[in-house]
């Protein structure tokens, strides 16, 4: 990453997209669909959610038009980067009969080079975790690897936090610190931009931009500082692995289980959850079958079924497994927390369960809860 900051006027953002496309990348960016902001392919700046703001709290998500010119003045939508690289459902191989028995054909995905426009700091942090899971262990996932081969990432430093955001306490935002090719900070009339890779530098050079002036840099720093200081939720400042495992029998697990529907929404929108199942889908003629992979959830009854017994028969056990793994034993497996502080698990929970509040109560013990200090 270079230290040099440039300024991209808003009216040249379409040229910015064109320069990226000229390098054979298909642009994927935020767009308003069915009342939410989702990532989809686009070519024109007109497709971006100009002037939209999001309002989020546990169990609620709304977007509304604010009337200004900004494209990225919202926190996040239900999607992270995960579906772009770890497909929700995909075929892995196909088996079919021939005269000698049967053969198996691998089914690696057909991909194209993509440029993701508008990746947030929390989602870049989550992508780094997914890379560790799928690309850096003893077994590399060829399906994930194929999709990650040719990706250009344009990060956006957040200038607005939803009430569910807690990336500051998770140590991942609101500024993008790595994992991007170019990063933007949006101001009223343009963007302060910085290259994070050689390709990012090449594209910025093609834009022939002027250097950002001191006032623009101060405004961009002030905007991201505002996003940080307005976050109202935070994880406890302690060793969560040690504290959570010391409270495996805390009464709050039963309390949250009475509200949890075990629907798995939190794991589906989580940018780091990677559990999946595999199953054969036979053809009706009996001559072939396709081996499919689908996202799964540790909240499902089948996830805890091992060797003829159910290891997590109650919702209490499943919620405890999810939270202690995400914030505790994930450190043992991957050397980092499994939570990046995006807050999606709260926003998209139909029971409006506030994960941060639950963690604070469980880690604070009975005194913390009874005193009301846990009310965030």
Image (tube, rainbow, N blue to C red):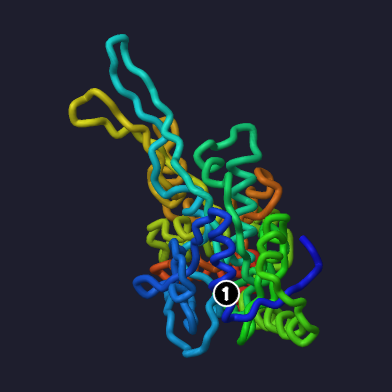
List the single residue furthest toward the top: 100
- Vertical comparison of 74 with 69: above or below: above
In which quadrant is the C terminus drawn? bottom right
Residue 262: x percent and y percent? 40, 57
Q: Is residue 338 left or right of residue 82?
A: right
Between residue 298 and residue 359, name the one nearer to us: 298
Q: Which residue is mark 1?
A: 13
Residue at 70%, 77% in the rendered image: 7
- Vertical comparison of 196 with 189: above or below: above
Residue 302 figure quarter: top left
Q: Is residue 69 left or right of residue 106?
A: right
Between residue 207 and residue 183, name the one nearer to us: 207
- Vertical comparison of 309 with 313: above or below: above
Residue at 44%, 50% in the rendered image: 297
Residue 240 figure quarter: bottom right
Q: Secondary structure at mark 1?
A: helix
Residue at 72%, 64% in the rendered image: 195
Kindly tell me whether residue 158 is visible in this rendering: yes
- Vertical comparison of 371 with 207: above or below: below
Residue 145: x percent and y percent? 56, 41
Query: 10 Å neighbourhood of mark 1: few (<14), some, or many (≥20)?
Result: some
Q: Is residue 87 left or right of residue 34?
A: right
In which quadrant is the N terminus drawn? bottom right
Kindly tell me whether residue 78 is visible in this rendering: no
User: Number of numbered discs present?
Assistant: 1
Residue at 58%, 42% in the rendered image: 134
Between residue 373 and residue 36, name the one nearer to us: 36
């Amino acid at each position: 990453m270079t230290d040099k900051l440039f300024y991209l006027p808003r009216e040249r953002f379409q040229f910015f997209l064109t320069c990226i496309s000229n390098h054979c990348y298909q642009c994927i960016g935020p767009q308003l669909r069915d009342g939410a902001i989702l990532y989809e392919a686009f070519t024109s700046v007109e497709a971006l959610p100009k002037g939209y703001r999001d309002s989020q709290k546990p169990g609620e998500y709304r977007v509304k038009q604010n009337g200004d010119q900004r494209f990225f003045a919202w926190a996040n939508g239900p999607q992270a980067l995960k579906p772009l690289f770890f497909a929700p459902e995909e075929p892995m191989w196909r088996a079919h009969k021939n005269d000698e028995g049967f053969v198996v054909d691998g089914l690696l995905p057909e991909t194209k080079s993509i440029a993701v426009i508008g990746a947030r700091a929390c989602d870049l942090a989550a992508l780094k975790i997914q890379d560790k899971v799928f690309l850096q262990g003893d077994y590399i996932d060829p399906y994930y690897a194929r999709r990650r081969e040719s990706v250009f990432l344009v990060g956006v430093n957040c200038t607005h936090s939803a009430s569910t955001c807690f990336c500051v306490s998770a140590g991942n935002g609101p500024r993008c610190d790595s994992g991007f090719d170019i990063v933007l900070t949006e101001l009223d009339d343009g963007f302060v931009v910085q290259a994070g890779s050689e390709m990012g530098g090449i594209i910025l050079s093609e834009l022939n931009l002027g250097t950002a002036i001191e006032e623009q840099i101060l405004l961009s720093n002030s905007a991201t500082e505002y996003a940080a200081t307005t976050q109202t939720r935070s994880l406890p400042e302690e060793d969560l692995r040690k504290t959570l495992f010391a409270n495996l029998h805390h009464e709050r697990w039963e309390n949250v289980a009475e509200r949890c529907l075990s629907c798995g929404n939190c794991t589906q929108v989580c940018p780091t959850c990677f559990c999946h199942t595999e199953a054969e889908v036979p053809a009706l003629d009996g001559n072939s079958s396709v081996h499919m992979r689908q996202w799964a959830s540790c909240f499902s009854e089948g996830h805890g079924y091992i060797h003829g017994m159910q290891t997590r028969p109650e919702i209490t056990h499943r919620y405890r497994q999810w939270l202690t793994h995400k914030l505790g034993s994930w450190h043992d497996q991957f050397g980092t927390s499994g939570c990046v502080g995006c807050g999606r698990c709260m926003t998209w929970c139909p029971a409006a369960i506030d994960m941060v509040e639950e963690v604070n109560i469980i880690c604070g013990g009975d005194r913390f809860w009874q005193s009301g200090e846990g009310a965030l």
